Image (tube, grey):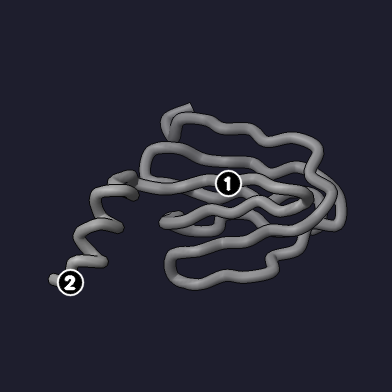
Amino acid sequence: MKIKDNILNYLCDRDYLISMYDNYFYIFNFKYLETFNEKLITVSLSDRKINIIGNNLLIVKITKEELLIKGDIEKIEVMKKNE
């Protein structure tokens, strides 16, 4: 394993990472996308579910590990999976 990978693993030793800035919502290491429309996006994480509620929601980037959402975000709901 490379030194860079060791450092990144140490710094980012989390199941997932969530960031929000301006009109963007970023999720790293999500499990799957449950719901997607212009008003609601539901994302499943390892132990939680996130509802992103707003208007004109758009998935700007989606890969196996990353999800970047843009739009007029009004509300974020975080729930444990068993709720």
Disc 2 secondary structure class:
loop
Which residue is found at the position 84% from the left and 48% from the top? 72
User: Is the residue under label 2 in contact with that under label 1 (CB below 8 Å)?
Assistant: no
Farthest residue, direction top: 83
Residue 8 position by quadrant: bottom left
* Residue 43 pos. (x, y %): 55, 50
N-terminal of the two: label 1 or label 2? 2
Residue 35 position by quadrant: bottom right
Disc 1 secondary structure class:
strand
Q: Amino acid at mark 1?
A: Ser
* Residue 1 pos. (x, y %): 13, 71
Which residue is found at the position 50% from the left and 72% from the top? 63
Q: Is residue 4 above or below residue 47?
A: below
Relative placement, left or right, of 49 versus 31 is right
Comparing 44 with 73, the one in front is 73
The circle on residue 19 is: 1
Q: Is residue 20 above or below residue 30?
A: above
Which residue is found at the position 69% from the left and 65% from the top? 59
Relative placement, left or right, of 14 versus 79 is left
Residue highlighted by disc 2:
2
